[in-house]
């Protein structure tokens, strides 16, 4: 199965309509399978006193509050409909990560998305996870900042919601996770992404083998949300069997905004997608036998 490559536009549109459409074009030109944005109500997401992350202070005005920054980066609901239609026209999937209950409802019931991406920061947010599961959408769950036990707990909440559980509780979540119906629902609906929530992530903190651990532990489709600089780690994840790769990109790394600096530019994005497709082809079928391109060589290279 081919790696599903998500070009993460995120908030790199800077609140600009034209830039959002240009990001879609860049993702299409690079050969991505999907382009993903972020959907949120800034007021529901941050208080007036909420601080920005250290990396955000480095890439935006340090005197600006988290709330003020988020207000600038909101993607209006009307623009979601336009972007989704444009993506359909261009033959690329439109995705978004919801960050609050209103945004979950909007993406699932108004925009009619079939797939929701859960950001790492929500993995311990039980009510949020329950809302996501009850939409019936397919789910990609990013696991940055989490332990294996926290991933298991989150999967229990999702299993409970996917199987129409009525009275939520820790014991009900565990029962849903352990049940045949819950496991079937998870395998049908949920994928996991290894992720390190540092921007950019140093190579020694990527821990790609944790992706293998997630796959072996939970038996779900797994992949990699890549916050490193460059393309090496995504190629390595492909070689380790990633089913999904997600990578931030921008039109210009020098633009103002929290995520541009740690993103790929359009040329780098195209190089990465091409590299992933080459790595996929190079993996082969695992059967040790002469390949078609070496049959002729055998006739002259072997003693006779």
Image (cartoon, helix red, strand yellow):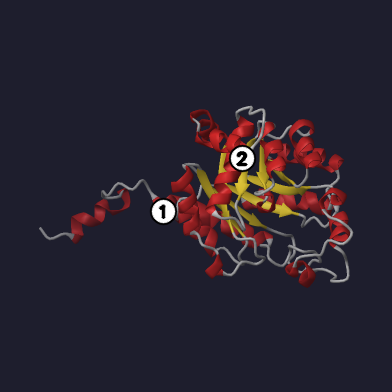
Residue at figure coordinates x 68%, y 37% from the top left: 130
Rendering quarter of residue 51: bottom right
Q: Can residue 92 be seen in this view?
A: no
214 vs 205: above or below: above
Comparing marks 1 and 2, which lies closer to the viewer?
2
Depth check: 276 or 139 in front? Answer: 139
Query: Image check: 264 left or right of 73?
Result: left
Residue at figure coordinates x 41%, y 53% from the top left: 282
Rendering quarter of residue 261: bottom right
Depth check: 41 or 248 in front? Answer: 41
Q: Mark 2 points at which residue?
A: 170
Quarter of the C terminus within the rendering: bottom left
- Mark 1 Cα shell of 10 Å, populated few (<14), some (14-19), many (≥20): few
Q: What element carries label 1?
A: helix
196 vs 18: above or below: below
Residue 23 position, x and y percent, is 74, 53
The disc placed on residue 239 is: none
Residue 295 position, x and y percent, is 25, 51
Residue 177 position, x and y percent, is 54, 37
Distance between the alpha carbons at the discs numbered 1 and 2:
45 Å
The disc placed on residue 282 is: 1
- Tally the marks: 2
Q: Is mark 2 on a helix, strand or loop?
A: helix
Depth check: 252 or 257 in front? Answer: 257
Depth check: 108 or 66 in front? Answer: 66
Instruction: For the residues labelled 1 and 2, say whether their Cβ atoms are less than 8 Å apart.
Output: no
Query: Image check: 32 left or right of 69?
Result: left
Query: Image check: 126 left or right of 61?
Result: left
- Mark 2 Cα shell of 10 Å, populated few (<14), some (14-19), many (≥20): few
246 vs 112: above or below: below
């Amino acid at each position: 199965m081919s790696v599903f490559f998500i070009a993460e536009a995120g908030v790199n549109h800077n609140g600009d309509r034209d830039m959002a459409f240009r990001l879609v074009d860049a993702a299409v030109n690079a050969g991505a399978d999907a382009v993903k944005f972020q959907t949120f109500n800034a007021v529901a997401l941050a208080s007036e006193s909420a601080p920005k992350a250290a990396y955000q202070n480095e890439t935006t005005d340090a005197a600006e509050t988290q709330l003020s920054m988020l207000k600038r980066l909101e993607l209006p609901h009307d623009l979601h409909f336009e972007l989704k239609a444009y993506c359909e026209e261009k033959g690329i999937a439109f995705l978004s990560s919801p960050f609050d209950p209103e945004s979950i409802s909007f993406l699932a019931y108004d925009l009619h998305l079939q797939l929701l991406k859960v950001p790492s920061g929500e993995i311990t947010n039980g009510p949020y996870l329950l809302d996501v599961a009850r939409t019936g959408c397919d789910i990609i769950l990013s696991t940055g900042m989490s332990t294996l036990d926290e991933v298991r707990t989150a999967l229990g909440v999702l299993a409970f919601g996917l199987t129409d559980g009525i009275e939520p509780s820790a014991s009900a979540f565990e029962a849903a996770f352990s049940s045949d119906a819950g496991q079937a629902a998870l395998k049908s609906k949920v994928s996991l992404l290894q992720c390190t929530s540092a921007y950019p992530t140093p190579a020694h903190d990527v821990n790609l083998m944790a992706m293998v651990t997630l796959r072996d532990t939970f038996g779900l489709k797994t992949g990699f949300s890549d916050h490193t600089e460059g393309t090496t780690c995504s190629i390595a994840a492909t070689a380790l069997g990633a089913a999904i790769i997600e990578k931030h990109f921008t039109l210009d790394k020098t633009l103002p905004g929290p995520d541009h600096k740690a993103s790929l530019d359009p040329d780098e994005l195209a190089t990465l997608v091409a590299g992933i497709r080459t790595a996929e082809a190079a993996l082969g079928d695992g059967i040790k036998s002469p390949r078609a391109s070496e049959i002729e060589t055998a006739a002259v290279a072997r003693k006779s």
